[in-house]
Image (tube, rainbow, N blue to C red):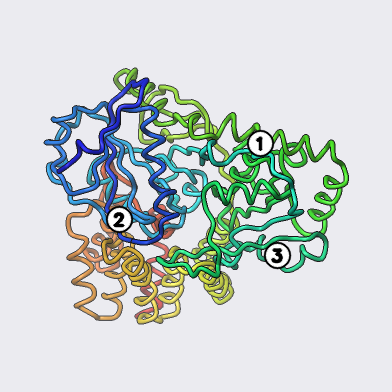
């Protein structure tokens, strides 16, 4: 254990913090490593920070440095390999928080994150794509503190360079179906404006020289030379750093009009341009022909990002800790709205981490809700299956639709197909995370059920063995189903009605049913497979 060599001493210091980072599983993607490592610099501005990146004894390290806070970096990105940490129960007096650094809301490593939170009894996680995380995993809705993306103001700034590029699009070619808005524009915008399309450097360990990869100040200066630059929020509706980098460099941001844009303070034709199709092109043309309006939008966008989202303005975890340290017995910390301040409120299982937060649906969450409603009602299962399959084409590692497809397969008596669907999310995680992953408890429940329906004792036995000792509502309900042999005659046990304190969370939408709806669905599945 060599934590000392990572210690920083940047003044002024207020708290000591231990930052636990997971192991790196990727090599060679320098720009991506630099992006994720920037968080250490940012945290060092608020904390006397000790960073540890190797297996360690939790109690030993905490006793040695006696931190005021332990921050756990969530597995994912270039660091998918969880550390082996012993003596986890030590020092319960030190608050613990999780943090998702560069993870997408659909990142497969969310399963490892939830297990980490369970293993260390971590109640809350700060997410840079917070609202999108809340939509993507309903079980996390009450546990997330949304925190904004940030930029390095020393790199992403207005260099004052001549604006020789009318419109630019950076990152083209990466997941075109996922970045649907950008894809629809890139094939037609050049009919209206001279447009520079700069392809994505790729996520592989080596990038060919002829792709001319750029990053850092070189990339920022390319943005600064553009009058307008586009950035997409994806079909999950979340902001990426580019949404802040573009206006920070003194260029007008062009983006789809989505709810999450508003959380950051962006407003159409005030500090950016929003829209799609011909209406969007008309707005760009109007602003381009109005020098005073263009300059006003450009400057207001630049100042918004510099004043609110520069790295030296990011103090969310420090502010949370300030509030936590003043809590009285029975209180908890709650965030007042997305990106709002923290305050002490009465605690309880029914109190969410964020108050007054209207989290509107993305294209993905709206489609998932519609699919789940159809499945429960037994309506248009064929059309629902086609819609779910089309969502899988957006990007290769979205996993949630597979579980709903598995339920549809069981309702059609296609047990082998259902087994394959329920296994697929785990297989995707294994491929992306170098086998350093786990089964989601909801997956184990459905695999055990499918194994019984298939009369596959091995599948059912392995699923139940892996689920042994995991506190989870879906597994308790399954055991009740097996104990009653599917008759449901006796009154249900008290522990199958709702989630209990200490229950594991799930990333899947199939774990969101009340008891009566779950029992109704199980009866339909059993009747379809007699």
Q: Position of residue 282 (x, y in %)?
A: 85, 53
Label 3, label 2: how far apart the Cα atoms are: 35 Å
Where disc 2 sits, the SS reads loop
Where disc 3 sits, the SS reads helix
387 over 471 or under it: above or below: below
Label 2, label 1: how far apart the Cα atoms are: 34 Å
Please count the marks in the image. Answer: 3
- Rendered residue at 45%/25% (across/down): 342
- Comes first in the chain, label 3 or label 1: 3
Residue picked out by circle 2? 24
- Comes first in the chain, label 2 or label 1: 2
Q: Position of residue 323 (x, y in %)?
A: 38, 22
Question: In screen coordinates, is 68 left or right of 237?
Answer: left
Where disc 1 sits, the SS reads helix
Question: In screen coordinates, is 411 left or right of 73?
Answer: right
Between 94 and 504, the one nearer to me in the picture? 94
Residue picked out by circle 1? 302
Quarter of the C terminus within the rendering? bottom left
369 over 223 or under it: above or below: below
Residue picked out by circle 3? 186
Camera-near label (3 vs 1) is: 1
Between 375 and 300, the one nearer to me in the picture? 300
- Tell me, for residue 377, which label it has, or none: none
Residue 256 seen in the figure? no
Label 3, label 1: how far apart the Cα atoms are: 25 Å
Which of the 4 image quarters holds residue 293?
top right
Which of the 4 image quarters holds residue 519?
bottom left
- Rendered residue at 30%/42% (across/down): 72
Between 406 and 276, the one nearer to me in the picture? 276
Q: Position of residue 419 (x, y in %)?
A: 34, 76
């Amino acid at each position: 254990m060599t934590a000392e060599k990572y210690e920083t001493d940047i003044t002024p210091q207020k708290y000591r913090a231990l930052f636990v980072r997971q192991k790196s599983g990727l090599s060679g993607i320098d720009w991506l490593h630099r992006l994720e490592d920037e968080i250490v610099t940012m945290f060092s501005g608020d904390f006397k920070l000790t960073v540890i990146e190797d297996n360690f004894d939790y109690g030993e390290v905490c006793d040695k440095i006696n931190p005021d806070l332990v921050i756990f970096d969530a597995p994912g990105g270039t660091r998918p390999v969880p550390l082996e940490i012993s003596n986890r129960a030590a020092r319960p007096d030190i608050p613990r928080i999780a943090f998702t650094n560069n993870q997408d809301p659909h990142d497969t490593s969310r399963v490892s994150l939830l297990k980490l939170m369970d293993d260390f009894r971590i109640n809350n996680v700060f997410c840079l794509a917070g609202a999108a995380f809340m939509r993507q995993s309903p079980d996390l809705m009450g546990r997330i503190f949304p925190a904004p993306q940030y930029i390095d103001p020393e790199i992403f700034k207005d260099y004052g360079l001549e604006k020789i590029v009318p419109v630019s699009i950076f990152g083209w070619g990466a997941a075109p179906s996922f970045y649907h808005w950008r894809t629809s524009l890139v094939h037609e915008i050049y009919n209206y404006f001279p447009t520079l399309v700069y392809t994505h450097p790729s996520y592989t360990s080596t990038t060919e020289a002829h792709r001319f990869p750029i990053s850092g100040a070189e990339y920022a200066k390319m943005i600064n030379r553009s009058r307008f630059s586009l950035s997409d929020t994806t079909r999950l509706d979340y902001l990426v750093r580019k949404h802040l980098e573009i206006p920070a460099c003194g260029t007008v941001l062009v983006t789809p009009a989505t709810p999450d844009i508003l959380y950051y303070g962006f407003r159409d034709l005030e500090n950016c341009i929003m829209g799609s199709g011909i209406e969007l092109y008309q707005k760009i043309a109007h602003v381009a022909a109005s020098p005073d309006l263009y300059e006003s939008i450009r400057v207001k966008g630049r100042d918004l990002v510099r004043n609110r989202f520069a790295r030296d303005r990011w103090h969310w975890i420090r502010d949370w800790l300030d509030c936590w340290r003043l809590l009285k017995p029975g209180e908890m910390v709650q965030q007042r709205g997305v990106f709002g301040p923290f305050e002490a409120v009465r605690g309880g299982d029914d109190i969410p981490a964020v108050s007054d937060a209207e989290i509107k649906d993305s294209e993905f969450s709206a489609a998932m809700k519609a699919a789940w409603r159809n499945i429960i009602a037994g309506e248009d299962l064929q059309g629902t299956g086609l819609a779910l399959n089309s969502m899988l084409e957006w990007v290769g590692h979205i996993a949630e639709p597979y579980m709903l497809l598995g339920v549809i397969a069981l309702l059609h008596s296609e047990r082998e197909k259902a087994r394959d669907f329920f296994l697929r999310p785990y297989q995707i995680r294994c491929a992306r995370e170098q086998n350093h992953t786990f089964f989601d408890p909801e997956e184990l429940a459905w695999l055990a059920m499918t194994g019984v329906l298939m009369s596959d004792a091995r599948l059912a036995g392995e699923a139940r063995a892996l689920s042994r000792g995991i506190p989870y509502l879906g597994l308790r309900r399954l055991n009740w189903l097996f104990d009653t042999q599917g008759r449901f005659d006796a009154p249900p046990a008290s522990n199958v009605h709702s989630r209990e304190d200490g229950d594991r969370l799930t990333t899947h939408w199939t774990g969101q049913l009340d008891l009566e709806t779950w029992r109704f669905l199980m009866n339909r599945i059993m009747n379809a497979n007699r």
